Image: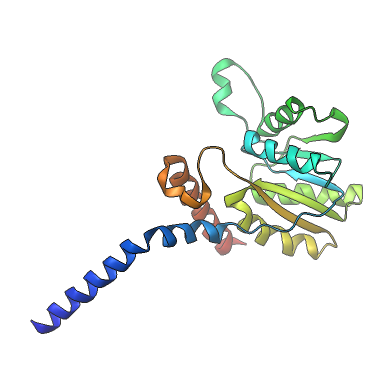
Amino acid sequence: MRKLFILLILLFFLATLLYLFRARALRSCAQFLIEENTLTKVDAMFVLSGGGYDRGNEAVKIFNASFTNKIICTGGNAVTELCVMDIDTLESDMTAANLRQHSIPDSCIVLIRNGTSTKEEAQIILDYCFKNNLKKIIVLSSKLHTHRVNSFFRSKFLSAGIEPIVCGAPSSRFNEMEWWREEEGLIAVNNEWIKTVYYWCKY
């Protein structure tokens, strides 16, 4: 009976600690997923597919800060919601459209309408770098994706003599450091942890 009482006290103490420090614990779940590099001037910037609004907006900021004069939008995934309106377009097209709305010249935009995953896009980008003799690039994804992108890109690209600088676009739908307060944040962190574990195990 005494052992059970001690166990209950310990569980209560643990539960109290978790409650008191819940925000810090939840925040650390997102902080682990964010791994950005310091921006420097590069040969080109690649904007990975998905999130054309947020990533496009961040790409405009980086372009206007003169870190690069070329933005390459990748991705072969269709924007399925637009099919309702009989609009056949890809995620890379959406990113490019956002760039044009912010007055980025067409001469500075390249479309690569291929790649349906980080793995596929990494190979496509590597091939493009070889073909165009690019030695230093920015890889732009969503902020919560940067740890996985960094882990996958750096070993693959550095061994090929190409330096990838990974940076992330903040979400316009939720605050990454308070992700649990919004449904979009809950989904984003959950999905990214699943992808991170998958990439750890498979690659």
Residue at x 57% of width, y 21% of height: 83
Residue at x 67% of width, y 52% of height: 119
Colouring used for the render: rainbow
Q: Quadrant of residue 49?
A: top right
- Residue farthest to the left, as pictured: 1
In this image, 48 relative to 64: left or right? Answer: left
- In this rendering, is residue 200 above or below 114? below
Residue at x 72% of width, y 27% of height: 97
Q: How many marks?
A: 0
Q: Quadrant of residue 201?
A: bottom right
The spot of residue 196 in percent (x, y) is 55, 57
- Residue farthest to the top, as pictured: 85
- In this rendering, is residue 109 above or below 200? above
The spot of residue 27 in percent (x, y) is 47, 57
- Residue farthest to the right, as pictured: 133
Residue at x 56% of width, y 38% of height: 172
- In this rendering, is residue 49 above or below 81? below
Q: Give the quarter of the figure containing the C terminus.
A: bottom right
Q: Give the quarter of the figure containing the N terminus.
A: bottom left
The spot of residue 38 in percent (x, y) is 74, 58
The spot of residue 2 in percent (x, y) is 10, 83
- Residue farthest to the bottom, as pictured: 2
In this image, 181 relative to 141: left or right? Answer: left
In this image, 111 relative to 190: left or right? Answer: right
* Residue in the foreground of this view, choosing between 151 and 60: 60
- In this rendering, is residue 185 above or below 147? above
